[in-house]
Amino acid sequence: MTRSELAAQIFEKKTYLCVGLDTDLTKIPKHLLSEPDPVFAFNKAIIDATLDYCVSYKINTAFYEALGVKGWESMEKTVRYIPSTHFKIADAKRGDIGNTSDQYARAFFETLPFDAVTVAPYMGEDSVKPFLQHQGKWAIVLGLTSNKGAADFELKPLQSQNMEEGAVSDLLYERVLKTVSGWGSSGNLMFVVGATQAEAFVNIRSIIPDHFLLVPGVGAQGGSLKEISEKALNKECGLLVNASRAILYASSGADFATVAAAVAKDYATEMEGYLTSLK
């Protein structure tokens, strides 16, 4: 999916919601466990219920890999069930030497029909570039994440021997944004920025004003949709805000899909208001 196609879907549907399909077999309604493929049965119901309120689905591959071959089969059935109108993200956090990243890219973009894959930039340009060689596909690079461990590296200042007295050095995440944004374009690169890092969004937009941001952490993790939207929306929206547990597990009963739809609709209604403010 191209940038213009994604933006068109956002403004047509008046939402920038991404539904995270982090499907945990231990948390889905018990009545589904008798299904031949409980994970897919759950995902299918969630997709059917939320299609009108979101523009994207994010599949966290760890929840499927943990189930072995059956999990991969559930993941493949799920991504193929999602219609082409919706942006499909493999949240796999890949990134390795060039020839290995090339195989990862082929796995998610050719063998499986994902539009994007999350990528860790630690190993540098040659580990990211293979994901940028596929037409209409995206690398979503980890920028500033929402976990506690972000403070261990991402928020550390970088020292430079050439710094003038009084100069301020980049934080590591800032250097990542500045450097990686030059490896591709705003048409094939996004960045992950956690919703719990809301105070950083103004600074991030000063570094990468045009790129889309994938923002996890709204809902169960406590991120504020209002604060993020006010600080990070750009003229083409530029945001995909992900909600997973808040939607998936809003109900553990037979009405799980209906309740999930209601939660997704609430997010979409709020987002419509913020999009209207762009006009």
Image: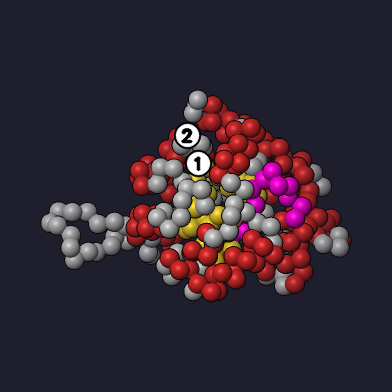
Instruction: Provide the secondary structure element on which disc 2 rests.
Output: loop
Please tell me which residue is depicted at 46% across the width and 55% down the height of the picture: 184
On residue 235, which mark appears? 2
Q: Quadrant of residue 104?
A: bottom right
Please tell me which residue is depicted at 78% across the width and 48% down the height of the picture: 45
The answer to whether 24 is drawn above or below residue 53 in the figure is below
The answer to whether 75 is drawn above or below residue 48 in the figure is below
Q: How far apart, in angstroms, are the residues tagged by discs 1 and 2? A: 7 Å
Crowd class of label 2 (few under 14; some 14 to 19; many from 20; radius 10 Å)? few
Residue 119 is inside the magenta segment? no
Q: Which residue is mark 1?
A: 238
The image shows residue 133 at horizontal and vertical percentages of 54, 60
The image shows residue 256 at horizontal and vertical percentages of 76, 46
Please tell me which residue is depicted at 54% across the width and 31% down the height of the picture: 275
Q: Is residue 154 visible?
A: yes
Q: The magenta stretch spans which residues?
A: 80-91
The image shows residue 60 at horizontal and vertical percentages of 63, 59
Instruction: Provide the secondary structure element on which disc 1 rests.
Output: loop
